[in-house]
Image (cartoon, rainbow, N blue to C red):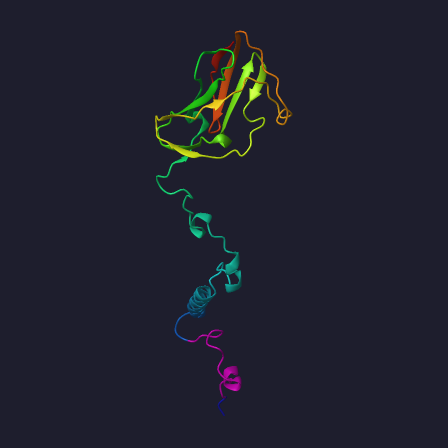
Amino acid sequence: MARRPAQDPSEQHGARSALRDPVGPEDRSVYVRRRLIVLLGLVAVVVAIVLIVVRPGAAAPDDAKDVKVPSDVAETPKPDAAKAGEPVACAKAALEVVPVTDQGSYGDGEFPQLSVSVKNTGKDACVADLGTAGMSFTVSSGSDDVWRSTDCQTNAESLPVVLKAGETLESEPVSWDRTRSSTETCEITRDPVVAGGASYHLSAGAGGAESEETAQFLLY
């Protein structure tokens, strides 16, 4: 009686996985490599899809508030408060202040009339306070300031004046009564200064600038 061929284990337990036990005319290792390549390709496709959906590094919606926006993009520059072409306050360096007296010498009983000349030496028009609040006079003898217009000044008023480039304006005169002043002498009779040919110098300030030179005069 002829023997039956030994039964293949696969017939008992079903066909084996094609990956684990490939069949065909090629060598088994060839089939294994082919299937590994196919699997790796599938894995790469899955990873690519996941990366597209998840987008690593992208901020979650809750993190949007933490995004920093450059200031030059987030804020709109505010326009200058001054209107275009409107004169601005005069710079001190642009004002030439010169003290002026109506005479070079004064006899007994004559009161010097003091004023100030202000010139805009800048290239553009500007605004200067030429009122009593922005103006001052000082009479000195040597290093002694014998009289200051601000010592007992009351009701000082501002007077903004537009000075064109190169323009010169002169203030209204202020009369000096030839007495010595201080903040303590506003309510009392002041002592007269020395006369008899004594020399005095006038300096002035206007628009925030001070005179560089003084005006000399004599009292008799």
* Magenta-highlighted residues: 4-23
Viewer-proximal residue among 30 and 89: 89
Q: Is residue 141 magenta?
A: no
Does residue 62 appear in the picture of this structure? yes
- In the image, residue 62 above or below residue 214: below
Q: Is residue 39 left or right of residue 179?
A: left
The single residue placed furthest to the bottom in the displayed view is 1
Residue 29 in view here: no
Q: Which sits in the foreground, 34 or 212? A: 212
Membership of 7 in magenta stretch? yes
Q: Is residue 214 shown above or below 62?
A: above
Q: Position of residue 54 (x, y in %)?
A: 48, 65
Front-lying residue, 144 or 28 = 144
- Quadrant of residue 190 in the image? top right
Q: Is residue 168 above or below residue 53?
A: above
Q: Main secondary structure of the magenta part?
A: loop
**At which x and y percent is residue 167?**
35, 26
Q: Picture coordinates of residue 114 (x, y %)?
A: 47, 20
